[in-house]
Image: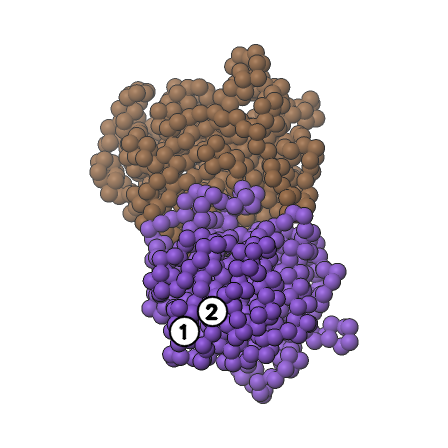
Chain colours: A purple, B brown
Amino acid sequence: MSNLVSFDGRVVIIGFGSLGPGVLPLLLRHFNLDASRVTIITAEERGHDIADKYGVTFINDPLTPENYRDRLIPLLKKGDFLLNVSVDVSSLALIELAWDVGAFYLDTCIEPWAGGYTDPGLSPSQRTNYALREAALKLKAAGKQPTAIITNGANPGLVSFFTKQALLDIARDTGMETTVPASRQQWAELAQKLGVKVIHVAERDTQVSATQPKQRGEFVNTWSIDGFVGEGCQPSELGWGSHENHFPADGRRHDFGSDCAIYLMRPGASTMVRTWTPTEGAFQGFLITHNESISIADYFTLKDGDTLRYRPTVHYAYHPCDAAVLSLHELAGKTWRQQPKQRLMMNEISAGVDELGVLLMGHAKGAYWYGSQLSIAQARELCPHNNATSLQVTATILAGMVWALENPERGLTEPDEMDFQRCLEIARPYLGPVLGVYSDWTPLERREELFPEDLDHGDPWQFKNFRVV
Amino acid sequence: MSNLVSFDGRVVIIGFGSLGPGVLPLLLRHFNLDASRVTIITAEERGHDIADKYGVTFINDPLTPENYRDRLIPLLKKGDFLLNVSVDVSSLALIELAWDVGAFYLDTCIEPWAGGYTDPGLSPSQRTNYALREAALKLKAAGKQPTAIITNGANPGLVSFFTKQALLDIARDTGMETTVPASRQQWAELAQKLGVKVIHVAERDTQVSATQPKQRGEFVNTWSIDGFVGEGCQPSELGWGSHENHFPADGRRHDFGSDCAIYLMRPGASTMVRTWTPTEGAFQGFLITHNESISIADYFTLKDGDTLRYRPTVHYAYHPCDAAVLSLHELAGKTWRQQPKQRLMMNEISAGVDELGVLLMGHAKGAYWYGSQLSIAQARELCPHNNATSLQVTATILAGMVWALENPERGLTEPDEMDFQRCLEIARPYLGPVLGVYSDWTPLERREELFPEDLDHGDPWQFKNFRVV
Ligand SMILES: NC(=O)c1ccc[n+]([C@@H]2O[C@H](COP(=O)([O-])OP(=O)(O)OC[C@H]3O[C@@H](n4cnc5c(N)ncnc54)[C@H](O)[C@@H]3O)[C@@H](O)[C@H]2O)c1
Ligand SMILES: NC(=O)c1ccc[n+]([C@@H]2O[C@H](COP(=O)([O-])OP(=O)(O)OC[C@H]3O[C@@H](n4cnc5c(N)ncnc54)[C@H](O)[C@@H]3O)[C@@H](O)[C@H]2O)c1
């Protein structure tokens, strides 16, 4: 796999933290992209040496609501690509700008301007990813071009592709005859027919450093620390399935938009759920809000007029690397005041795998996990300046950029609407083992041995059974 | 400080895990104890090399309810000392045996026979430390001799001495004239007069290994892993103060005994509270059950007939070493099935301090922490075969054994009833910096910035404000 797409435009990369340096070599490798056609705009010196190594222009000049048009418009013309892998720069502002100049756009989340995730002046509902997505969907309705892809990293992003592949696998393995669905409606009908009630994005990151333990006052992670703290302090959010019989006491509905998701009146960084991955087995992960929890739930919704017929519950269940678990614990102890130091683990990682996939539950075979088990060793072999976590993201960015250029007139697009097979084909060489595993695990396993709990024994797949209280 | 007491008896040490090897050199140093007068009975080969190094008899032959009398009676005569630093061997059985032969006794907890902490056949109330202590108090009532000290480690143990010193310090610093109280009644009156509402045993263990991170499937700790998992799976317990206005929804009272403590219908290993220590500042610790939560609350109780007049809320707020935080997280994820591997951190510790003290709150100066900040480096200088955690325990064992020999006819005794000044005098050279620090921290600090919470703003010292939900 070398040149994937013919592209003679320029690429402007916003942000050069963990993802920027990781995606740059992929673009240079697969786009026949001359380094002189790439510009980085970022907010600090981090990564300057890497940019220099590749001969790419590096501009340390933070974008703000006031300056971003002046800074970016001179750098972009029709057919160029604006890639946003920053924090604190509004995705929606950049998309409108990209459309104004006729440039393609891609990001891996929907980012607000600085402080948007934790602005105490906003209501919890306004600080959700649901609200950010609804704002993006309004832009989509305007129907502008060219293709602008949002939320296309590993998760959100890749996991939407995994979900579709997992549904086809379960259909095959339960003897259900099916062709690849051709529409959103058909996909949702397949999920319903299979009886899928719950979809976790079930991730266990075991990357660890044998030489640099987390220090006090240091937040350590395998990807953006600011990004993780930001989303961790947002309200916990989940797509709310049609099978759910117990609305959480701290759950709230939004009074606008599709109503496909709810939020909890607490930060995701202090909300835990039981889940399962093949290597780890059962574990507890954080129910951090993520855009895929909302977009996948929305995509697989079936309605009869205004009446909900089917929707899976969808949410993240994230066991970050051990040092990040400790960092979250410390952060909570400091009542969400971010640590003075941060460390993105990269060269010091000595071992570990980012086991990231979707866990589809409630169907005839119980639970099915489908995803990537990329190790740090394999990530290093495959592409420089990546760890296992970033490569799962940057490979999907690559796939999304290729797909955008191949499908230039799709306007604002979510991963759920893209060609999952084409995208998986492009990303897969960088994902390590990609596989599906069935399990008879349920969240009722071994419960109540020592203490009675408030459980629904009639339906293991109720959210209240997963939630750690 | 060399020979502390004249003793020509024999010492039988049950268990030789983390505490056994740590206390042995202290006894040999301060008891003029010939190695030939020491026998170790344990359940595995661990520590055999250390015993050999000191020339002490090492017997690997687990005690059981069936064999313990046959094994121990030949080894003990009047005036000897039975020291129990094992897990899974009943303290009460050993105390009765010690009294039968006329031997002194000391342990650092009240241990049931194997499985007692997590026997699903017992009710949660029966699995509490409150129940274990009530059973011990029944033995006490029998009035047998010689002195048998229970729960005399660092905590429980040392922290009872710290509490008394802290009360005297606060009295001094608030200009309250007082002499050292001479009775339980007077101590409780002092605490009441000072307005102490809450006492945390606030501990932050920062010991860490820069070469051996926790592995998957491994429980790592700086002291007994079996002991910690056992107490972590017991119900969370706390002495329940007279100022408390909000009885926890999951709280339960016992229908027997002094009623000084309550328990929660959940394991302490999943129950967290906000607390504070001088070096760490604010943090979240585990509300693991401990005997001191009950004995200190009981000791400082004032009643008018049957009516409760005063009692502080007392509980543990424990931040174990980082690797143990991760171990607990994994254990919870496996629904309390203990990890297949365990590792007691000792030589591989590269840095860290066990900051262990009592945090007295609600008085005129807010909060006062008094305790030991022993570092691993200092512990290693002071005594071989110890880390910072074990030395705080073994120094207190030493103090307790000396005190028992100096006070041979006290029958069953809790640390709260011992001479705290004599015991601190003996232990102190092994505790590193021992100091008191005032703080204006309260559990309401920085709360509700992002989400409303169910708090009592009228009284910061209510348990519901400390608890993490
Ligand atoms: N979908 C996914 O799977 C996924 C995975 C990882 C990260 N992300 C998201 O991607 C984004 C980047 O992640 P990362 O791990 O590379 O983050 P990072 O924190 O490592 O780097 C962020 C970069 O943004 C730059 N930046 C900050 N403020 C800026 C400004 N005002 N103008 C220009 N640049 C600015 C920083 O200097 C830094 O280079 C984050 O929003 C993160 O949430 C998504
Ligand atoms: N009060 C305190 O501050 C404090 C602190 C640490 C430990 N403790 C308690 O002290 C005890 C010992 O702690 P540790 O850290 O040394 O524990 P450990 O787990 O390191 O060692 C326990 C020892 O007991 C032995 N043992 C197990 N079953 C036995 C049996 N049936 N017969 C004889 N020996 C047996 C084991 O072989 C081992 O040598 C535990 O009960 C623990 O809870 C109290």
Q: Chain of mark 1?
A: A
Left or right for B381, reference B265: left
Verify CB contact (< 8 Å) between mark 2 and mark 1.
yes
Q: Give the SS element for disc 2.
A: strand
Q: Is residue A354 visible?
A: no
Position of residue B253 relative to residue A4, above or below, is: above
Q: Chain of mark 2?
A: A
Q: Give the SS element for disc 1.
A: loop
Q: CA distance from mark 2 to mark 1?
A: 9 Å
Q: Is residue B45 visible?
A: yes
Position of residue A194 relative to residue B441, above or below, is: below
For the N terminus of chain B, give its image quadrant: top left
Q: Which mark is residue A33?
A: 1
Residue located 59% across and 19% down the image: B190
Q: Nearer the viewer, residue A411 or B85?
A: A411
Q: Residues within 10 Å of mark 1 (few under 14, many from 20)?
A: many
